[in-house]
Amino acid sequence: MAATPMQGKWVQLKQNGTGPGARSSHAIALVGNKVYAFGGEFQPRVPVDNHLYVFDLETETWSIQEATGEAPPPRVGVAMAAVGPIIYFFGGRDATHQELNELYCFNTSTNQWKLLTSGETGPQNRSYHSITSDSQNVYVFGGCGVEGRLNDLWAYNVADQKWINFPSPGEACKGRGGPGLAVVQGKIWVVYGFAGEEADDVHCFDIAKGEWKEVETKGEKPSARSVFSTAVVGKQILISGGEIDPSDLGHMGAGCFTADAYGLDTETLEWRKWDDGVGSEEHPGPRGWCAFAAGSRDGKEGLLVYGGNSPSNDRLDDIFLFTPTKY
């Protein structure tokens, strides 16, 4: 007998002002009540711009952030995460289709860009990797490297301003792009991703012990997928949407996307499906390659999703916020 679905609600946010417009393969980060958006493409593999856009969740208004310092060049497949008032941007792919490995930061208090590391320092060049953060570190996993898909895990310590290379997970966790990445109570979780085919495995790295293990999950397991949206809700890892079957055209085409959402309890290791109003006007529908971040509304944790690619291969420019009502 299937477990009772967890209940949540999607709300589509209004957008005023000058925003990024439709795009995919971009990234967002949340600092306070402001969403920062960077990078992405409208035409496949062609970076749109390198403006940093800001969306105020209270006024639902976009603006272009004025800044000092040197901003990163335009790129797709970039990843970014915030620690306090500072947003960290790593990697991506430029207009010549070259993978990058620069780490930039943007201080939202001073509105200043800064290049922190590049070249042989830190993780090798990559795009379509995953990133997450806690109060001390920015974690980077996997992605598409110069010579293939990667499965390495790194941390950038924001106080020491140094990279840490964690032990390899080995062949059990194949190199992959577009996986879910989450940090929950001192453990890093790698969920699904594209490893030559859509994967449905889960791996966990215990930071204190320095040990990897493949996690056997149970419950109503989601179908294999990649490039989905991810957030931590309590002790659960929430995944939404994603690509369940890649396009024969590769990145130039749209694969088969799903609209469903699931939560993985990191204590019981059980998957449960969210009853999130799929098919309603407020639901984002099937999509992948979105920008996403953990969000909140009325004091409740949730998931913020912006843009992405649609089943028709059209880029999207809408914003949705998901918050749980019962789980």
Image (cartoon, rainbow, N blue to C red):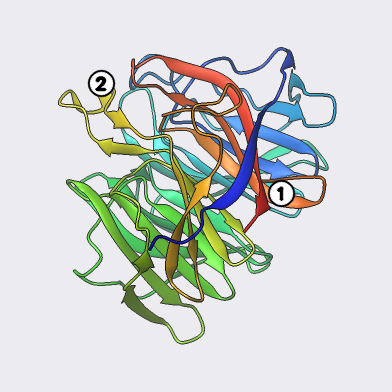
Quadrant in the rendering for residue 209: bottom left
The quadrant in which the C terminus is found is bottom right
**Place of residue 277 in the rendered image (x, y in percent of width and height, measured from the top left):** 55, 35
Residue 67 vs residue 258: left or right?
right
Seen in the picture, residue 175 relative to 228 is either above or below; the reply is below
**Place of residue 38 in the rendered image (x, y in percent of width and height, measured from the top left):** 57, 30
Depth check: give the residue in front, 121 or 30: 30
Which residue bears the numbered disc 1? 86
Between the residue at mark 1 and the residue at mark 2, the CA separation in whole angstroms equals 35 Å
**Place of residue 132 in the rendered image (x, y in percent of width and height, measured from the top left):** 54, 55
Residue drawn at the location 41% of the way across and 29% of the way down: 286
Quadrant in the rendering for residue 174: bottom left
Depth check: give the residue in front, 97 or 80: 80
Residue 274 vs residue 96: left or right?
right
Label 2: element kind: loop
| Res 253 label | 2
**Place of residue 30 in the rendered image (x, y in percent of width and height, measured from the top left):** 69, 43
Q: How many marks?
A: 2
Three-letter amino acid code at disc 1?
A: Ile
Residue 172 vs residue 212: left or right?
left
Seen in the picture, residue 202 relative to 240 is either above or below; the reply is below
The quadrant in which the N terminus is found is bottom left
Residue drawn at the location 40% of the way across and 72% of the way down: 204
Three-letter amino acid code at disc 2?
A: Gly
